[in-house]
Amino acid sequence: MKKLLCTIFILMLSGAVFAQSDTAHFNRGVAQFNNGELQPAITSFSEAIRLNPNHAEAYARRAWAYNRSNNSDQAIADANQAIALNPNLALAYFVRGTAYVNRFNYERAIEDLTKSIELDPNNALAYNNRAIVYNTLRDIDRTIADYTQVLRLDPNNAAARRNIVEPLITRAKRHVDRNDYDSGIADVTQAIRYDPNNAEAYGVRGVAHQSKNDINRAIADYETYLRLNTNQRDPTRQSISSMLASLRNPNTSNPVPNTTPRPAQQTQPTQPAQTAQGISWDVYIAANIVDRYSGQTVRREFKYQIRTRDEVDARSQAMSQFLQEYPGANSISVIRTQRWAGN
């Protein structure tokens, strides 16, 4: 009887040591990873996996370390194993999605990062990485939405505060181009909140205020622009300087650059097809237009979301809407489309 009890005790003790060793190696790997010791972390996670082959998080953590070591293939393999062991492990989808970013597989990256966010809505890194993908694809609205979520979760995130500014200014210009001055002012004011020394932001807001005949605010923004941008040879600065002079001297003509006037009803989007339940397309159009901010001809990208089952029909609807909004544009082309399901 004593021998039996002794054997049971030894087995229980060995099981406890097994569990402690598994956890100890995992925790050591986490600490090493947080300290930037990637190879030691990989070794520790590997030992944890050897002791416990069903340790999903160890696979996910090792995948993260591999990805940080620029080994995206091994990162994806480990993330796949982690997901096979635990399909609800948000970290595994985050790591695999980030690895797909590194491999320029943006569609798979968006799928995985979106799944990670669904499982863990408070993961600021997942929103940040998806924002990077959207910005690479020039999907400005989704870029801004994701960076906004990052800053909601992490208000002091310096990278997100910096990276959201350019998309906000880009969208503000598009609003101004479409005579939606209030939306343009809202976007560029947000950009200024994140970067108070961004001269371009004040210039764009000044144009919007002047277009609304809000002269005092336009003058204030133009003055700030000229104070921040001291490059006398900059054509945009010269244009802003001329506009400011005209506002200070009402007897001169108003030199605000303008696109071809168009009836108000033409700025309304065409109605999407009603037969495309759950299917929409983002259609990206590039064209040369007159920039109301600088007065120069510039090439811009525009995104239209069209709900229809057929890609050709989506392109046609987007082009029709664009031509209504920008009748004076030239060198127009559809540069790409992206299909979304379940929208």
Image (cartoon, helix red, strand yellow):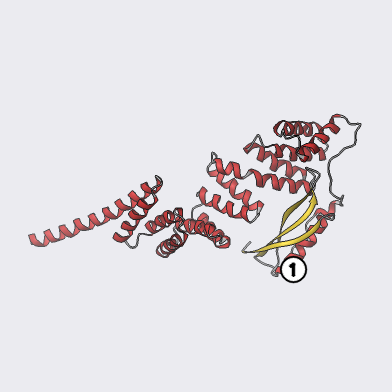
The residue positioned farthest toward the front in the image shown? 233
Q: Is residue 307 above or below residue 184?
A: below
Q: Position of residue 27 (x, y in %)?
A: 34, 49
Q: Is residue 271 visible?
A: no
Front in this rendered view, residue 336 or 186: 336
The residue positioned farthest toward the left in the image shown? 2
Left or right? Give the position of 205 relative to 6.
right
Q: Secondary structure at mark 1?
A: helix
Left or right? Give the position of 98 relative to 180.
left
* Quarter of the figure that contains the C terminus: bottom right
In this figure, which residue is indicated by the disc labeled 1?
313
Q: Is residue 322 visible?
A: yes
The residue positioned farthest toward the right in the image shown? 251
Which residue type carries mark 1?
Answer: Asp
* Quarter of the figure that contains the N terminus: bottom left
Q: Position of residue 326 (x, y in %)?
A: 81, 54
Q: Is residue 263 above or below residue 206?
A: below
Left or right? Give the position of 43 relative to 316.
left
Q: Position of residue 317 (x, y in %)?
A: 77, 64
Total marks in image = 1
Q: Is residue 294 above or below residue 70?
A: above
Q: Position of residue 335 (x, y in %)?
A: 71, 61
